[in-house]
C-alpha cells in the first residue's frame, strides 16, 4: 500500500512539474509585457489540463505547442497563440467576456480560471453540446454556451468587458460595438485588411473605439 501510494504521488509530482514547464514555456512565447498578466496566465495554464479538451488519441500531445484537431473540421489553437490573445484582454475577476468560437472549451476554461464569467458562442450545435459536457464534467459552471452565429453578439448579457474572437472577420461586426462596455472595453479579433489578415485590438473610450493593428495572423474566416 505504501509503495503504491508513493508511486501515485511520484506520478502526480511529475505531471505537476511538466504542467508548470509547459505553462511557463508557452506564456513566454506569447511575449507578455505586463508581469502581473504574465503571472496570472502561467497559473491559469498550470491549473487547466489541456488534455481533457482533446480527443483521446491526441492526449499525449497536450504539452506540445501545436494546433490539434477536435472534430467537426475544427482545431484547438496553439497554446502560445491562445496565451497571446488572452493577454491582450487583461482579464480581471468578475469581468464578463464574450467569446466567439467556443471550440473545445479550452480557452473558455482558461478565461473562467482567470475569474471571468464567460459567454461563449459556437455555430456548430453538436460541438457546443460536446464541449458543454466537458466543461460541466470539470467544474466550469461559470461558462455559458449558446449555439448561434457570433456575428450577432449576445445582447441579452451585454455590456461585456471584453470580446475575444477565434475566427476572422472582414470588418468589426456592428453588434459587437453595441455589446462592448463603453469605457475600458477591449475587443481582440483577427480582421482581413488590405495588407492581409492582422490581429487587431480595439479599446473603447466614451463610446468610441480605437483600433490598434498588431501582428499577422492566420485564423479561419467566419462563414
Image (cartoon, rainbow, N blue to C red):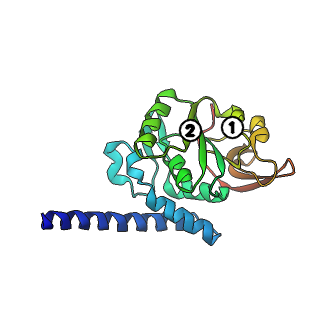
Instruction: Give the percent coordinates (x, y) of residue 220.
Output: 59, 40
Camera sees residue 166: no
Task: Name the one closer to the observer, 20 or 212.
Answer: 20
Q: Quadrant of the N terminus?
A: bottom left
Q: Is residue 2 above or below residue 83?
A: below
Which residue is pictured at 43% across the width and 34% down the height? 130
Q: Residues within 10 Å of mark 2 (few under 14, many from 20)?
A: some
Which residue is pictured at 47% across the width and 34% down the height? 73
Q: Secondary structure at mark 1?
A: helix
Instruction: Give the percent coordinates (x, y) of residue 139.
Output: 44, 46
The tally of labels here is 2
Q: Residues within 10 Å of mark 1 (few under 14, many from 20)?
A: few
Residue that numbered label 1 is attached to: 157
Mark 2 or mark 1: whose residue is earlier in sequence: 2
Task: Name the one closer to the observer, 155 or 76.
Answer: 155
Left or right for 14, reference 77: left
Left or right for 179, reference 81: right
Q: Quadrant of the C terminus?
A: top right
Instruction: Give the percent coordinates (x, y) of residue 87.
Output: 62, 59
Camera sees residue 220: yes
Task: Name the one closer to the observer, 141 or 36.
Answer: 141
Q: Disc number at residue 144?
A: 2
Left or right for 24, reference 56: right
Q: Secondary structure at mark 2?
A: strand
Which residue is pictured at 61% across the width and 65% down the height? 37
Which residue is pictured at 55% across the width and 54% down the height? 82
Does the CB distance between marks 2 and 1 fall below 8 Å?
A: yes
Q: CA distance from mark 2 to mark 1?
A: 11 Å
Q: Is residue 157 above or below residue 214?
A: above
Instruction: Give the percent coordinates (x, y) of residue 204.
Output: 80, 51
Amino acid at each position: 500500500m505504501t509503495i503504491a501510494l508513493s508511486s501515485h504521488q511520484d506520478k502526480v509530482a511529475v505531471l505537476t512539474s511538466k504542467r508548470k514547464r509547459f505553462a511557463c514555456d508557452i506564456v513566454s512565447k506569447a511575449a507578455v509585457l505586463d508581469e502581473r498578466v504574465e503571472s496570472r496566465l502561467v497559473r491559469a495554464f498550470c491549473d487547466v489540463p489541456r488534455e481533457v479538451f482533446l480527443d483521446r488519441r491526441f492526449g499525449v500531445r497536450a504539452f506540445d505547442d501545436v494546433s490539434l484537431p477536435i472534430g467537426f473540421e475544427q482545431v484547438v489553437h496553439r497554446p502560445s497563440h491562445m496565451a497571446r490573445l488572452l493577454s491582450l484582454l487583461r482579464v480581471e475577476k468578475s469581468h464578463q467576456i464574450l467569446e466567439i468560437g467556443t471550440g473545445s472549451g479550452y480557452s473558455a476554461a482558461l478565461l473562467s480560471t482567470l475569474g471571468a464569467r464567460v459567454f461563449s458562442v459556437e455555430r456548430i450545435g453538436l460541438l457546443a453540446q460536446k464541449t458543454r459536457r466537458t466543461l460541466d464534467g470539470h467544474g466550469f459552471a461559470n461558462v455559458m454556451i449558446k449555439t448561434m452565429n457570433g456575428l450577432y453578439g449576445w445582447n441579452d448579457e451585454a455590456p461585456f468587458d471584453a470580446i475575444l474572437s477565434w475566427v476572422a472577420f472582414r470588418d468589426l461586426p456592428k453588434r459587437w460595438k453595441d455589446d462592448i462596455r463603453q469605457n475600458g472595453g477591449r475587443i481582440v479579433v483577427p480582421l482581413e485588411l488590405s495588407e492581409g489578415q492582422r490581429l487587431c485590438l480595439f479599446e473603447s473610450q466614451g463610446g468610441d473605439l480605437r483600433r490598434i493593428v498588431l501582428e499577422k495572423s492566420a485564423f479561419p474566416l467566419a462563414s
